[in-house]
Amino acid sequence: DLSKDSLVINDYNPLEAVYKYELVPLAISSKGLSHKILGGQANVWTEYMEYRTKVDYMVLPRMTAASESLWTAQEKKDYKGFIRHQNSFILPRYESWGSS
């Protein structure tokens, strides 16, 4: 039933927003406490994702964006470069796994 396909718990989180996410809030970094943040996480609740293909669609590109975002300093982030790499290398890999 495709009527369930777009049901989300909170709101749609586009790939660009995930990529541009800044792990350390300004309120923390401005106090010199950035070193207290050890890492991040990207939760996914699948109770409204009835099909594996929907989970793949929601998780895989965002997992890649979250990973690069967490490992890359804000001033070195390049969303257009990320998309080029995604289209050239990452998405073909997902497709070879049977995920897209």
Image: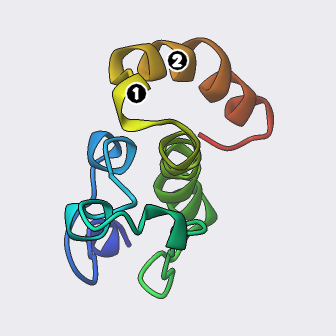
Does residue 76 lie above or below 66 as drawn? above
Question: In which quadrant of the rendered view does residue 2 lie?
Answer: bottom left
Badge 2 crowding class, 10 Å Cα cut-off, few under 14, some 14 to 19, many 20 or more, is few
Does residue 48 lie above or below 69 as drawn? below
Which residue is the site of mark 1? 77
Contact, mark 1 vs mark 2 (Cβ under 8 Å):
no
Q: Residue furthest right?
A: 97
Q: Secondary structure at mark 2?
A: helix
Q: Position of residue 48 (x, y in %)?
A: 41, 82
Q: Position of residue 79 (x, y in %)?
A: 35, 24
- What amino acid type should be assigned to the residue bearing mark 1? Lys
- Which residue lies at the image location 33% right of the left edge and 53% below the top edge? 22
Left or right: 98 in relation to 60:
right
Q: Position of residue 13 (x, y in %)?
A: 27, 58
Q: Position of residue 78 (x, y in %)?
A: 38, 21
- Which residue lies at the image location 62% right of the left edge and 64% below the top edge? 52
